[in-house]
Image (cartoon, coloured by chain):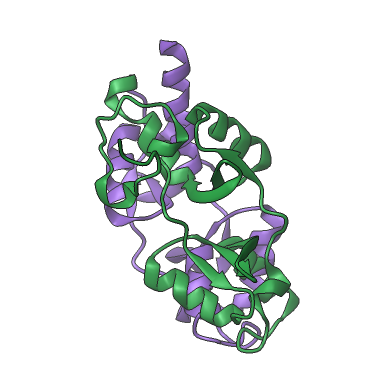
């Protein structure tokens, strides 16, 4: 078994809690990411994914230019310690139906584990068996 | 014998030894009409708890729409979700693989193209969808490890 820390993306990317939904969408597009953290000062206060944007903005017909990101972010942030095995993160993400999980070290967010990272992890073992 | 693409959404057997895409995909596919608005499409995806839908026009599947399309194309271009049609933002043509191929091929293809959803065909007809989550279910299956 391997630690989550070996497979997560790091450092974490974030937007300020005062940006608009459109700003956040631009940021996610520019960085080619499906999830971004929201920071208020030095504190992480939430996470926004393509799913939040689809369901809470597009699906509700909100104006992305005037909607502030904190009104549609997911909070509190679900997280896992980086020294736990990837298998446990997989079970947790499956149960909560999430594609992105915040990863912490000493209670501080240091990375994010995505469903694509899970594929990388599990296919690596799969190849070795063949 | 049962059809190859019996919905795994309801009957998925996590102990299956099959390595065919057909046994790990979601089926049947969920579709919207090309005349649907972007907002209606997002709502349907929410209700069905799915990350992509196929777009149908005149009884033919013509495109695919994912959450990434909905957020990037709609929000970045400032399109109005209430009036924009799903056909304006769908990805076309639909990229697909045959359901009898091994799932490792779907994985290689999706990784290369950076896709989270891939349409699956049987005799050239779209019968299902495989997602990156389905890939995890397959590769994390203890039978193969």
Classify the position of the N terminus of chain A by image quarter: top left
Above or below, comparing residue B31 to residue A57 in the picture: above
Considering only vertical position in the picture, is B49 above or below B137? Answer: below
Q: Residue at x 55, y 35 (%)?
A: B106
Relative horizontal placement of residue A86, taking residue A18 as reference (left or right):
left
Along the line of sight, the residue nearer the viewer: A108 or A59: A59
Closer to the camera in the image, A104 or B139: B139
Q: Is residue B12 visible?
A: yes
Q: Residue at x 63, y 80 (%)?
A: B35
Relative height, residue B15 to residue A56 (above, below): above
Q: Quadrant of residue A87?
A: top left
Foreground: A118 or A17?
A118
Q: Colour of chain B?
A: green
Q: What x and y, as percent, mark residue B92?
A: 72, 58
Residue at x-position 67% and y-position 53%: B94
Q: Nearer the viewer, residue B17 or B111?
A: B17
Q: Residue B32 lies in what quarter of the image?
A: bottom right
Colour purple, chain: A
Residue farthest to the front, as pictured: B1
- Total marks placed: 0
């Amino acid at each position: 078994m391997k630690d989550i820390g070996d497979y997560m993306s790091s450092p974490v990317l974030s937007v300020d809690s005062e940006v608009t939904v459109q700003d956040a969408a631009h940021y996610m597009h520019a960085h080619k990411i499906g999830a971004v953290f929201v920071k208020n000062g030095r504190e992480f206060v939430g996470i926004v994914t393509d799913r939040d944007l689809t369901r809470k903005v597009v699906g509700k017909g909100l104006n992305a230019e005037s909607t502030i990101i904190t009104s549609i972010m997911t909070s509190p942030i679900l997280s896992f310690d980086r020294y736990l095995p990837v298998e446990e993160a997989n079970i947790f993400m499956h149960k909560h139906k999430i594609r992105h999980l915040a990863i912490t070290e000493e209670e501080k967010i240091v990375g994010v584990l995505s469903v694509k990272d899970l594929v990388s992890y599990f296919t690596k073992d799969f190849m070795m068996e063949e | 014998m049962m059809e190859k693409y019996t919905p795994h959404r309801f009957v998925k057997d996590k102990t299956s030894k099959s390595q065919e895409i057909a046994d790990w995909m979601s089926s049947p596919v969920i579709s919207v009409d090309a005349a649907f608005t972007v907002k209606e499409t997002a709502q349907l995806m929410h209700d069905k708890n799915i990350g992509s839908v196929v777009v149908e026009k005149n009884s033919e599947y013509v495109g695919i729409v994912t959450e990434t399309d909905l957020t990037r194309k709609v929000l970045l271009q400032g399109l109005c979700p209430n009036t924009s049609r799903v056909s304006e933002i769908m990805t076309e043509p639909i990229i697909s693989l045959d359901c009898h191929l091994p799932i490792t091929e779907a994985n290689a293809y999706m990784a290369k193209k950076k896709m989270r959803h891939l349409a699956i065909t049987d005799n050239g007809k779209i019968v299902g969808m495989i997602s990156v989550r389905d890939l995890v279910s397959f590769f994390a299956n203890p039978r193969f490890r």
